[in-house]
Image: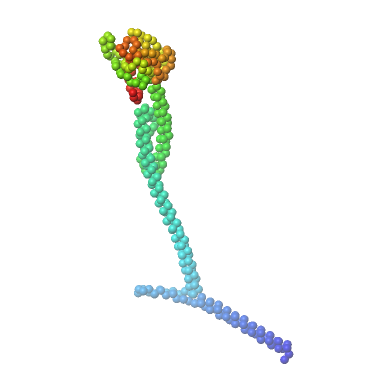
């Protein structure tokens, strides 16, 4: 046998083996896919057997449909599990939020209580303010009463707004009250409202009004009050004013001065020992104008103090009582 011949035979054997190999693989694959196709083509009968006497329920289904149905079921179950997990998270979050909201609600309730208290206090304040304004004659005609009945949150807000308005109005009222008090303060200084002796009360030996004269023993009108005390006691002006008369009357007032005040008031200080002021001099309330004495028609050291409005003599104590805060 020639080497070439030998080679050809070997080649033929190899090719034949190779072909057998591939055909075997082809057979295998054909059988494999055939089996799968056969499986999918297979018909399955699903039978539901109830425990009662009712009819058996069955239906036929191909294996392929069965696989698809099982796949879909698995997908549904997985989806359900996934969503329920997420829902649990959402639910926890919701619980937290609900707790926060409940806390807020409780806080809001406390705040509403506080607002209610504040509004009640404000109402008391408003009533007090109105009565004060009434007594001072400052009540404004357009000051309408607010309705303070408490209700919903919207009402609370409206009431708070009303309260703000009230407080703003109050500022105006207090401004007026302050001005009035200032005016009264200056009125107190301008009217003869203080005791005419410095630091001592003395003894009132004769009041204003009809009485018997110490010398003639006849009834007459005593035009002032007599305050007895030791000679040299300081006499003060009972209001701001100007000295318009300074004289000596041996048969009556002795050393005396007359001071003119605002609003038509005049005061006279008589029987003085010494006089420290001159005619035309401006004096202030409480300023020392001289000393108590026994000059003129007098039975002992005393100050005769008179108050006049225009030409009309009035009881000095009406004005002295007005400012009785000073204790001797
Ligand atoms: Zn007198």
Specify the quadrant of the image occupied by residue 164. Answer: top left
Q: Give the answer, above or below, for where 149 lies relative to 310.
A: below
Looking at the picture, tell me which residue is in the foreground, 158 or 189: 189
Say whether residue 275 is visible.
yes
Query: At 36% across and 9% down in the image, what residue appears?
Result: 249
Q: Give the answer, above or below, for where 132 lies relative to 270.
A: below
Query: At 27% across and 9% down in the image, what residue appears?
Result: 216
Specify the quadrant of the image occupied by residue 133. Answer: top left
Say whether residue 309 is visible.
no
Looking at the picture, tell me which residue is in the foreground, 157 or 259: 259
Q: Is residue 320 left or right of residue 30?
A: left
Specify the quadrant of the image occupied by residue 181. Answer: top left
Q: Position of residue 197 (x, y in %)?
A: 36, 19
Question: The N terminus is located in which quarter?
Answer: bottom right
Query: At 39% across and 15% down in the image, what residue appears?
Result: 290
Q: Position of residue 153 (x, y in %)?
A: 40, 44
Query: At 43% across and 16% down in the image, what residue appears?
Result: 282
Q: Position of residue 321 (x, y in %)?
A: 33, 22
Q: Is residue 38 left or right of residue 19?
A: left
Question: The C terminus is located in which quarter?
Answer: top left
Q: Position of residue 173 (x, y in %)?
A: 41, 30
**Which residue is farthest bottom?**
1
């Amino acid at each position: 046998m020639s080497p070439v011949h030998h080679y050809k035979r070997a080649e033929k054997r190899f090719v034949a083996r190779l072909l057998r190999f591939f055909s075997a693989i082809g057979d295998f694959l054909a059988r494999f896919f055939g089996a799968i196709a056969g499986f999918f083509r297979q018909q399955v009968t699903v039978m539901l057997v109830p425990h009662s006497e009712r009819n058996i329920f069955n239906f036929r289904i191909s294996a392929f449909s069965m696989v698809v149905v099982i796949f879909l079921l698995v997908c549904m179950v997985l989806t359900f599990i996934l969503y329920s997990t997420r829902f649990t998270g959402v639910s926890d979050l919701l619980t937290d939020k609900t707790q926060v909201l409940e806390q807020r609600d409780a806080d809001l309730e406390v705040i509403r209580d506080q607002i209610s208290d504040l509004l009640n206090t404000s109402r008391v304040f408003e009533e007090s303010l109105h009565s004060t304004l009434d007594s001072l004659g400052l009540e404004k005609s357009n000051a309408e009463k607010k309705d303070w009945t408490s209700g919903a949150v919207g009402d609370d807000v409206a009431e708070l707004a009303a309260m703000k308005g009230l407080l703003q109005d109050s500022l105006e009222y207090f401004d007026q009250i302050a001005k009035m008090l200032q005016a009264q303060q200056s009125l107190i200084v301008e009217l003869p409202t203080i005791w005419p002796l410095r630091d001592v009360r003395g003894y009132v030996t004769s009041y204003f009004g009809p009485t018997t004269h110490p010398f003639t023993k006849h009834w007459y009108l005593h035009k002032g009050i007599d305050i007895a005390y030791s000679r040299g006691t300081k006499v003060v002006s009972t209001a701001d004013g100007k000295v318009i008369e300074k004289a000596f009357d041996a048969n009556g007032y002795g050393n005396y001065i007359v001071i003119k005040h605002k609003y038509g008031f005049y005061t006279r200080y008589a029987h003085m020992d010494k006089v420290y002021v001159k005619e035309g001099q401006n004096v202030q309330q409480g300023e020392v104008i001289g000393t108590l004495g026994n000059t003129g028609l007098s039975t002992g050291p005393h100050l005769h103090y008179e108050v006049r409005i225009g030409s009309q003599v009035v009881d000095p104590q009406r004005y002295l009582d007005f400012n009785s805060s000073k204790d001797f």
